[in-house]
Amino acid sequence: MDVPINIRSQHSLKVQCEKSICGNSIRISDLQEEVSRRKKHIADLDHEIHTLNENISTLTKELELKGKEVLKIRSEANQQIRAHEQDLCKKHEREMAELNALHHRETQNMLSDFNKAQELLKDKISALQILLEGTEEKFRNRESRPEDLQTIAELKDMVTERESLVKKLVDDKKFYQLELVNRETNFNKIFNTNPNVGVINPLVKQKRKNDKSATRFSSSANLRANVEASGTGSGQPQPNRLEPIPNSPIHQLEPNTSKPLPPPTPLTEPKKLTR
């Protein structure tokens, strides 16, 4: 009973071993194929790496060549730029010189035109000045207008009339003063009196109340003496001259030619001027 069991177990073991061997052989073949594929892939990769290295070396050489070409082109470009800049600078200098010369010529032309215009204006000004002087001379030497002559004649007539009126008033004043002196003398002779009768002179400056040296009264004898003394020069007796009002422009002792006399107060109806 034990022998068959061992045989069956051995057989089963053998079958399992064969199966495992068969599976292992399949697996080994698969692994060998995988290894061959990997080797092939590795060889392809090595070839690709070699190709890439060759390409890298080629590109490196080309890059070096391109770098040298770039440096060469850059140096040439820099030289061309410098040469172009020098040409532009020379051209700019020439243009600036031409513009300066043109500006100088235009300035000289404008200056000459200005001088000519100034001389022309000076000539015009001198001509106008001469014309103005001639016109002023004609104006100064012009003939009087008829209405001006008529006005001057009327004013002269008015002045003559006023002077005659003033002369008459002065004569009347002298007459009344002499008449007053004569009446006082006759009165004293008739009544045999010697009163100290005087005439009030309102033009004498009034002094202070305590000052008794100055008086506003003049006796008849003094008045008569003054009248006779003033009349000795002209041969006829003249009354005493009243003292002028202090600081009065009307009673100035000497005529003032710098300002005109004030208009007189008309006693009669003034003559109307006709124009």
Image (cartoon, rainbow, N blue to C red):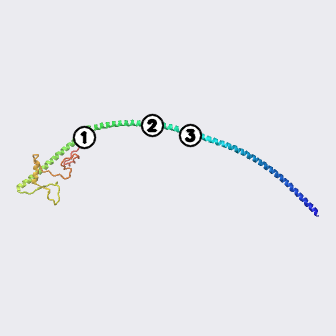
Of mark 1 and mark 2, the one earlier in the sequence is 2
**Mark 1 — residue?**
148
Return the disc, 3 or 1, that comes first in the chain's sequence: 3
Q: CA distance from mark 3 to mark 1?
A: 95 Å
Q: Which mark is residue 101?
A: none
Residue behind mark 3? 82
Q: Residues within 10 Å of mark 3 (few under 14, many from 20)?
A: few
Is 142 left or right of 96, judged from the image as shown? left
Helix, strand or loop for disc 1: helix
Image height check: is 23 above or below 48? Answer: below
Q: Nearer the viewer, residue 164 or 53?
A: 53
At 66% from the left edge and 43% from the top edge, which residue is drawn? Answer: 64
Return the residue at label 2.
104
Q: Residue at x 22, y 41 (%)?
A: 152
Q: Is residue 49 left or right of residue 26?
A: left
Q: CA distance from mark 1 to mark 2?
A: 65 Å
The picture places residue 40, in percent across and down from the top left corner, at 78, 48
Amino acid type, mark 1: Asp
Closer to the camera in the image, 241 or 85? 85
Q: Say if 85 sits above or below 191 in the image.
A: above
Q: Furthest-right residue in view? A: 1
The local secondary structure at tag 2 comes to helix
Question: In the rendered image, which quarter contains the C terminus?
Answer: top left
Q: Are marks 3 and 1 in contact (CB under 8 Å)?
A: no
Q: Is residue 108 above or below residue 228?
A: above
User: Of discs 1 and 2, which sits in the foreground?
Assistant: 2
Q: Residue at x 80, y 51 (%)?
A: 35
Q: CA distance from mark 2 to mark 3?
A: 32 Å
Q: What amino acid is at disc 3? A: Arg
Mark with earlier residue (2, 3)? 3
Identify the element where label 3 is drawn.
Answer: helix
